């Protein structure tokens, strides 16, 4: 590392980017932050002022990725990082124009289009669900043919998207036809639908929580290193996360199996850069890869800190983006269990009518952070996935029994009343 070089890291900032303060703290003594923001977005008015106090703000409203690269070039960036899937593709173009380390355009496509990702993994022999591609707005007759050829139940999801947005559990041919012939495709959903076989759970218990986990890893000098396996609380219908438990309670044998299939998936996609978040489901035939994300997993840095791991994963992500040796000692040890509990609305709910008890969440043992996202009067729509959280609670516990006790207490503390309409379920 050149002692005279000033590291400047590009961060594309929007409402889904991690906390400004977390990123500021992670960057302290490491790099200057260069925030790319869209100032035409009204939601960026207040963040823009804050960001300007902890870095350099570059307005990229209305610019193409190549134009964004030219807008930030005068600042002299030495790295770029993406914290959500939507910014991976544009960041790849910007990195290429500025000669910065990042996912290649080919890898970025596999990371952001589920069809290309499934094809690459299946071709390499990685266990994935059976799948097929379906365009938006199919004519009724063609949709009927597709429905007749599909083994149900199945999972229908946009080829592009994250956070369980617009993911449907399809039980009947009539339901599938209705979704395929809809006039308006989901917003920001890419080029069409991906239909996947529904994966049954394993024929033996693998966790006291859910049979889905994520493997958190990073790539350095061509070698993949695993940091942790992150467990899940049981999902809400249709496939919405309700929280995480880190580290997971998988047995050592199942932990290795999840890590091995995740490593095979990362290799199949040709990933050579940064952090990876690989979702894995256990089935009667062993672990199957649901999805690979070419970024740090959402809330994973916070969970690692709550679990007592001596690691700032945001800082590690920045170091990797800058081509620096990460400040980490492997394996990471977790003396406690970090957890995140999410409250999501029922599928048929359209509005929060009342909420009681949220002021007492702070009294639940082990709770460290509370975020209330919806208030009485606010509308909700399950199809927006993790965007539609009512609240989230972070905390820690000494063991998994204590995690379960604290989860139950959180759920009992808050009472939410909803209004319902005829929004179709899934």
Image (cartoon, rainbow, N blue to C red):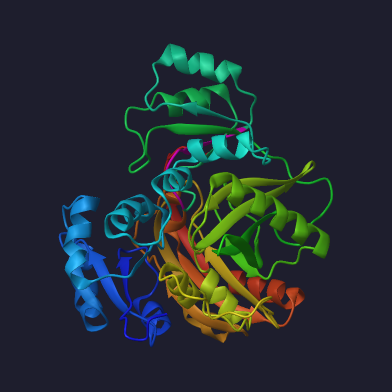
Q: Is residue 371 left or right of residue 155?
A: left
| Vertical order, 390 against 203 (above or below) | below
Residue at figure coordinates x 44%, y 46% from the top left: 112
Q: Position of residue 411 (x, y in %)?
A: 60, 69
Quadrant in which the N terminus is drawn: bottom left
Residue 389 lies, in percent from the top left, at 45, 61
Residue 91 lies in what quarter of the image?
A: bottom left
Tell which residue pokes out farthest to the top in this image. 141
Place residue 308 in its image quadrant.
Answer: bottom right
Counting from the top left corner in percent of width and height, residue 189 is at 38, 40
Relative to the observer, which residue lies in front, 133 or 373?
133
Q: Is residue 344 visible?
A: yes
Q: Residue at x 28, y 60 (%)?
A: 98
Residue at 35% x, 80% y: name it.
Answer: 31
The relative height of residue 324 versus residue 422 in the rendered view (above or below) is below
Q: What range of the chain is rendered magenta?
A: 154-162
Residue for point 45% across, 41% down: 113
Give the side of residue 33 with respect to residue 111, left or right: left
Viewer-closest of 70 and 413: 70
Depth order, front residue of 91/270: 270
Left/right of residue 6 with respect to residue 171 in the rendered view: left
Q: Is residue 169 visible?
A: no
């Amino acid at each position: 590392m050149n002692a005279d070089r000033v590291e400047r890291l590009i961060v594309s900032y929007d409402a889904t980017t991690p906390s400004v303060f977390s990123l500021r703290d992670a960057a302290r003594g490491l790099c200057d932050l260069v925030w790319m923001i869209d100032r035409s977005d009204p939601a960026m008015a207040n963040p823009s002022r804050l960001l300007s106090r902890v870095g350099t703000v570059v307005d990229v409203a209305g610019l193409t990725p190549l134009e964004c690269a030219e807008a930030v070039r005068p600042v002299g960036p030495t790295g770029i990082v993406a914290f959500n899937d939507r910014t991976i593709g544009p960041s790849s173009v910007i990195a290429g124009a500025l000669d910065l380390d990042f996912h290649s355009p080919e890898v970025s496509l596999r990371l952001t289009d589920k069809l290309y990702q499934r094809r690459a993994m299946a071709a390499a022999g990685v266990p994935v669900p059976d799948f097929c591609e379906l365009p938006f707005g199919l004519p009724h007759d063609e949709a009927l043919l597709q429905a007749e050829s599909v083994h149900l139940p199945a999972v229908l999801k946009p080829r592009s998207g994250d956070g369980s947005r617009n993911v449907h559990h399809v039980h009947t041919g009539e339901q599938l036809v209705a979704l395929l012939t809809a006039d308006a495709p989901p917003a920001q959903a890419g080029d069409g639908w991906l239909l996947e076989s529904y994966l049954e759970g394993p024929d033996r218990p693998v966790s006291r929580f859910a049979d889905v986990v994520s493997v958190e890893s990073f790539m350095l000098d061509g070698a993949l290193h695993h940091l942790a396996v992150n467990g899940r609380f049981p999902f809400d219908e249709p496939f919405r996360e309700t929280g995480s438990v880190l580290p997971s309670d998988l047995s050592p044998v199942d932990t290795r199996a999840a890590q091995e299939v995740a490593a095979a998936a990362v290799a199949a996609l040709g990933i050579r850069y940064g952090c990876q978040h690989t979702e894995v489901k256990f089935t009667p035939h062993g672990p199957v890869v649901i999805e690979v994300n070419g970024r740090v997993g959402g809330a994973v840095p916070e969970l690692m800190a709550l679990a007592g791991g001596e690691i700032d994963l945001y800082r590690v992500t920045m170091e990797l983006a800058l081509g620096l040796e990460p400040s980490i000692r492997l394996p990471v040890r977790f003396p406690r269990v970090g957890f995140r509990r999410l409250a999501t609305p029922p599928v048929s709910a359209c509005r929060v009518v009342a909420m009681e008890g949220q002021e007492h969440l702070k009294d639940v043992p082990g709770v460290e952070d509370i975020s209330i996202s919806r208030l009485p009067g606010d509308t909700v729509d399950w199809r927006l996935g993790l965007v539609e959280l009512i609240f989230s609670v972070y905390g820690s516990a000494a063991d998994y029994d204590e995690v379960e006790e604290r989860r139950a207490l959180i759920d009992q503390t808050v009472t939410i009343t909803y209004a319902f309409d005829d929004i179709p379920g899934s």
